[in-house]
Image (cartoon, rainbow, N blue to C red):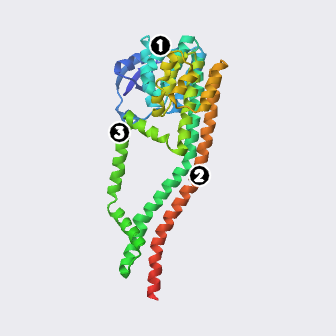
Amino acid sequence: MPYYQCRLAGDDGRIESRSVLAPSVEDCRKSLEAEGHLVLSVRRDWNRIGALGLQLGRRIKDRDIILFNQEFVALIKAGYPILRSLETLTARTKSIPLKEILIKVSGEVKRGKALSEAFLPFEKIFSPVYTASLMAGEKGGNLPASIGRYIQYMKIIVQTRSRIKSAMTYPTILIIFSFFLMGILINFVLPQFADFYKSFEAEMPRFTQFVMDSAIALNRYWYIPLALIIGGAVLVARMRRHPDFRYHVDRTKLRIPFGRTVWLESGVSLFSRTLGLLLEAGISLLGAIDISIQAVPNVWIVRHMKEVPYHIKNGESLSESVAQAGTFPALALDMIRIGENSANLQGMLADMADFYDERVRGKIETLVTLVEPVVIIFMGLVVAAMLLSVYIPIFNIIRVAR
């Protein structure tokens, strides 16, 4: 979506220039005239091409979505109409991708569409949970409360992701540093020692010779492993687009001894939290269950639960339907069953999500505490092996010289 340089005339006769993001010249002119401006000229702003190009392909951050919805709720509660609230927030937002979406949504609302219908084409960005919350708020006549519940939902999801990322930061830094150190030794240190040994015409130990030959080969033909890494990354990126590839990868994740519980319980947490939010918003169980299943990030779990809506439609309870999928742990099924029997399914789903969030966080912290010493030991062994391969021949040369 391009920028347009607009010249506007004010009530006091002053001429103002403004750069406006709009789908077309006509839309830009109409939006400014609707605000009460006298538009003198509208032309393409080519100076903003570079700034706009930096935004291409960038996804909208979760915090931008949360901030937009918080301000949106505040404006609606203050008595602003929905269209005016959207236009106000569109002018204020600094995220170019979000601004483009809000411009399109505002245009659809102007044409008479409901807010949930206007956001429907952008479900992949805002998630189906968001559009379902908007629809429930429109039908129930309490849109701010429905969006408010979604904001709390998003905050918990973002907080969980942030904890996982922060927990894995230190091990990742250690791994990167170890490879960086190995690269320095292989490319700069070991080749110098290889030339030094050749000048003495000394016979090196097999281990030292192997390390030296590997270092020289990597130093000469560095582009081969680099090409293999880039080719592998491109191949994986293309294969990830195929559902079957993601299905097999996610199934493999659930077979890893320690990782199985982390991925499975995080999926259970996200499913229960999403379902509880939609039920609290007033959506029926049958309408909410499909959206909640799609919210689970593991494709293997999603495929095994695709028959759950069919079983519920045939009159079975939620706990019985989920049990037939064979994916959820027994404790989760018991908690769902208790929530159904006590007529407090929404509250039990929220408690279940909090419970499994805590379990996942504890397991990740345990995993990090185990990974840190393993990485340090591995890095120490690699450096020690390289140093030994360098110093053992030196000791041999000194012994022969004596």
The secondary structure type at the circle numbered 2 is helix
Residue type, mark 2 in image: Leu
- Tell me the residue that label 3 is attached to: 238
Are the residues flagged by discs 3 and 2 in contact, CB closer than 8 Å? no
The secondary structure type at the circle numbered 3 is helix
- Tell me the residue that label 2 is attached to: 370
Q: Is residue 377 above or below residue 91?
A: below
Sequence-earlier tag: 1 or 3: 1
Q: Is residue 371 above or below residue 349?
A: below
Res 71 quadrant in image = top right
- Residue 180 lies, in percent from the top left, at 46, 58
Sequence-earlier tag: 3 or 2: 3
- Residue 28 lies, in percent from the top left, at 39, 20
The residue sitting at 35% across, 49% down in the picture is 230
Q: Nearer the viewer, residue 174 or 392?
A: 392
Residue type, mark 3 in image: Arg
Q: Is residue 219 above or below residue 257?
A: below
Residue type, mark 1 in image: Ala
Question: Marks 1 and 3, Cα distance to the nearest angstrom?
Answer: 37 Å
Q: Which quadrant, please, contains the N terminus?
A: top left
Q: Mark 3 Cα within 10 Å, few/some/many (few <14, many 20+)?
A: few
Question: Marks 1 and 2, Cα distance to the nearest angstrom?
Answer: 51 Å
Sequence-earlier tag: 1 or 2: 1
Q: Mark 2 Cα within 10 Å, few/some/many (few <14, many 20+)?
A: few
- Tell me the residue that label 1 is attached to: 114
Can you tell which mark lies on residue 390?
Answer: none
